[in-house]
Amino acid sequence: MQETLRIYLPFVIIGVVYFLIVTGLKKKFRIGYLKGLWLPLGVVILFFGLAVYARVNPQPGSWNDLVFAAMTAVSTLTLATYVILWLVVSLFSKK
């Protein structure tokens, strides 16, 4: 089972690294975690829109709809990693 889950590891790592970058920017420029949410959310919306467009306007012999659906799934995983880390930090941070 670990071999099948290993494919998701790079996208979780991307989410963790992005969260660390936003955390560093938060400390330096006083931005919130909510502003850091816009980029991964925008990527998910972009790929979802492209997947819907590719599904509505199919190209013969094209794999675009499958590729965009897969990119939507993995970008959603990155977004979920960011949100989960945000919740963990919010729960354990002292105010």
Image: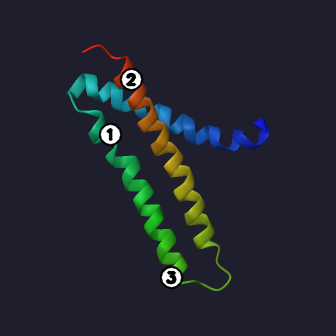
Query: What amino acid is at disc 3?
Result: Val
Q: Earlier in the sequence, mark 2 or mark 1?
A: 1
Name the image quarter holding the C terminus.
top left
| Rendered-image quadrant of the N terminus | top right
Counting residues from the N terminus, which is met first, the one under dot 1 or under dot 3? 1
Q: How many marks?
A: 3
Judging from the image, what secondary structure is the residue with disc 1 in?
A: helix
The residue at 61%/39% (across/down) is 10
Q: Is residue 34 left or right of residue 82?
A: left
> Whole-percent x and y of residue 86?
39, 31
Alpha carbon of mark 3 to alpha carbon of mark 2: how far?
A: 41 Å
Where is residue 13 shown, x and y percent of the image? 55, 34
Q: Is residue 24 left or right of residue 75?
A: left
Classify 10 Å Cα crowding around label 3: few (below 14), some (14-19), many (20 and above): few
Where 48 sits versus 62, above or below? above
The residue labelled by disc 3 is: 56
Disc 2 crowd, CA 10 A, few/some/many (<14, 14-19, 20+)? few
> According to the image, label 2 marks what residue?
89
* Identity, as a three-letter code, of the amino acid under mark 1: Gly
